[in-house]
Amino acid sequence: MTSPTPTPDRRLFGPGPSNPYPEAVAGLNRPILGHLDPDFLAIMDDTCAMLRTVWGTENSRTLPLSATGSAGMEAAFVNTVGPGDVAVIAVNGLFGERMCDVAARCGADVVRVDHDWGQPIDPQRVADAHPSPKVIAAVHAETSTGVRSDIAALGRLKGDALLITDAVTSIGGIELAADDWGIDVGYAGSQKCLGVPPGLAPFTINDRAFARRIEHPQSWYLDLGLLGGYVGEASARHAGRTYHHTAPTGMIASLHDGLARILAEGLPAVWARHAEAGHILQDGLEKLGLELFAAQGFRLPELTTVKVPEGVDSAAVRSELLTRYNIEIGAGAGAYASTVWRIGLMGHNARPDAALLILAALAEILGR
Amino acid sequence: MTSPTPTPDRRLFGPGPSNPYPEAVAGLNRPILGHLDPDFLAIMDDTCAMLRTVWGTENSRTLPLSATGSAGMEAAFVNTVGPGDVAVIAVNGLFGERMCDVAARCGADVVRVDHDWGQPIDPQRVADAHPSPKVIAAVHAETSTGVRSDIAALGRLKGDALLITDAVTSIGGIELAADDWGIDVGYAGSQKCLGVPPGLAPFTINDRAFARRIEHPQSWYLDLGLLGGYVGEASARHAGRTYHHTAPTGMIASLHDGLARILAEGLPAVWARHAEAGHILQDGLEKLGLELFAAQGFRLPELTTVKVPEGVDSAAVRSELLTRYNIEIGAGAGAYASTVWRIGLMGHNARPDAALLILAALAEILGR
């Protein structure tokens, strides 16, 4: 029980984590530094600068939170809504639902705007749901359904509200332009299209949202006012650093090196690579006679949802992919657990060869 | 800016993170697995089992939280206290103070029992502070002062209250016996005596505390009722796993392999190694004419506090250690920032050669 066991080398073609970029793995192998070491603080500042680029923002308060993407969601709400604040939340999948739960735990008055799963959100309907919400929240790329929504359109309609955006599955995979689109608060995860192991939540908040934040949020760990003494804000001010918590320095070095690799390729090229891999996969699945789940025109290239064919045992296929080919794909989410598969080609896996491999493996197992 | 830079190979002799065990570093290099992969779930279950051993507990709900030790503190309070609940908190350093802040954000009625920094807590005074608190909380090993407190004595006096214990700097370094001592809820960190990179918070809660928990805590991310569907409780029940959030699978593999290394050496031998290294260091510092800060009889072997000699610039010495010898030590905490040094010999660094090295470097720089 207590000795290390061999670990299978999986192809992580599920909804995340994805196989990290080799550069991000190499980053994990850098010597661990202390969280107040000047050399580490330089890595942290570089990381924040590169995060600004992938977010498409100038926000000084752009930083990696020391937890996974779901904690990023929690940070977005605990810092912006308190008891009685109206939060309009667009729900078109599992992560929109989770937002409602998280916001309600902050005491917010949640106005939920439901959409069919597999469809994008309707920005006008979301904007019309309440005359004066404090925040409007939506998921850019719904991990549960593989659907992209038009955040820019929502940003044009938001009025005085703060716009919170979940970019967990979009960042580093498809176009994201926080400032141009009017995103006031955004959170993401390291482990999908950024191609870094799971454990960090890239986060950004603009001055407008920070000025209207909850000054003493219910979470100490995710209190952006306190965090600002250590990272993001502090680095922008070139001020002294105040200890808050022990940053996961090794993970941040990995994120740094993963981001450097992405920016060396260039964001437009990275997006084009994701688009190409997703196109090959989705085209190939249809040629196998399978039916895609997400609404046409709104399909994410990095995360494809496909219906399990009639009479096929979803779990048995996933199990055979895993044991025979070391390939992981995801089950569906929520009510679609056994009727949809989720296939991610994210980050390092956003390549034509990965698309060919999963198509060949599925064709073989399904006998098509 | 965007290309990886060489990273100095520091000796991390501060209050944490410490240099990880080589086995924990090797664990980081295992291929990343999905958080629902059966091979990963086996690693997770093994990890929880080994965590029970280092905690000294049989609690089924023993698990690594996906964030750092400070999030462990937050998890302890958000799951046990709500508005109006009385929380008696022993404060003899920075982390006791932080507990008061975190508990207050949960709406708790905080009864703070202050002690001088550098002294252990007085269990009787803490127990007498309120007739019927819901929780009593104390820090086992105060990272800010290098002091050990008698948690077993507090456990004998706790009455009906739940005992919350901060074991961030004690776990894996000195004796810890959660069940025997009456600890109901405990949290720790991966990055000190466990010798694993920062990013995880080993956590344990017993059935008594779980039964009296806040059923719908203000934190979704740290909701132990929800987490129980994925890890700890679920593995004990051999039940199906429910997705909660994406576990940091790489970090958990590293923790697994670090724990396996500790248990291969044996906990008593590991504790003896920490005791020996701390003794050499503390003895040597006194021979250099320096004065220890923590009260005699209550000094942690893994974290030594020493007064900065009269007329010596604390920051200049730390800077010279860093730049000339690649050695990190810590400044003091709070009011002692410039008058105390904190020297940690934790985990992989709990060795006689590490003690000799820091003594030699200090002697050279101080000209003694």
Image (cartoon, coloured by chain):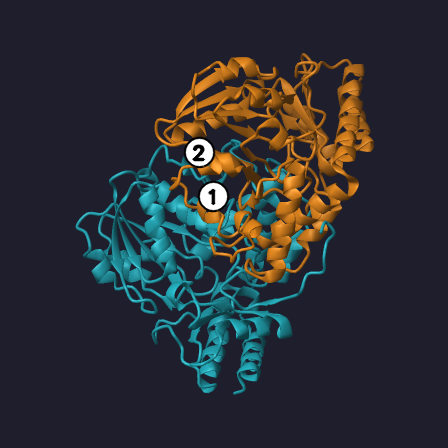
Chain colours: A cyan, B orange
* Whether residue B298 is situated above or below residue B187 in the rendered picture: above
Q: Residues within 10 Å of mark 2 (few under 14, many from 20)?
A: many
Q: Nearer the viewer, residue B170 or A20?
A: B170
Mark 1 = which residue? Answer: B224
Q: Say if labels 2 and 1 share a chain.
A: yes
Whether residue B158 sits left or right of residue A149 in the image: it is right
Whether residue A285 sits left or right of residue A9 in the image: it is left
Query: Which image quarter holds the C terminus of chain B?
Result: top right
At a point 47% along the width and 50% down the height, the residue shown is: A202
Report if residue B332 is visible in the image.
Answer: no
At a point 75% along the width and 46% down the height, the residue shown is: B22
Whether residue A272 sits left or right of residue A127 in the image: it is right
Looking at the picture, which amino acid does disc 1 mark? Leu
- How much space separates mark 2 and mark 1, taking CA atoms? 10 Å
Mark 2 = which residue? Answer: B80
Q: Position of residue A368 (x, y in %)?
A: 52, 87
Q: Nearer the viewer, residue B109 or B239?
A: B239
Q: Residues within 10 Å of mark 1 (few under 14, many from 20)?
A: many
* Whether residue A344 is situated above or below residue B294 in the rendered picture: below
Q: Position of residue B285 (x, y in %)?
A: 77, 19
Which residue is outermost to the left?
A: A131
Residue A192 — which label?
none
Q: Nearer the viewer, residue A361 or A257?
A: A361
Of callouts 2 and 1, which one flags the residue occurring earlier in the amino acid sequence?
2
Report the number of discs.
Answer: 2
Q: Position of residue A125 (x, y in %)?
A: 21, 61
Mark 2 belongs to which subunit? B
Mark 1 belongs to which subunit? B
Residue B295 location, quadrant: top right
Whether residue A117 sits left or right of residue B197 in the image: it is left
Q: Position of residue B305 (x, y in %)?
A: 67, 21
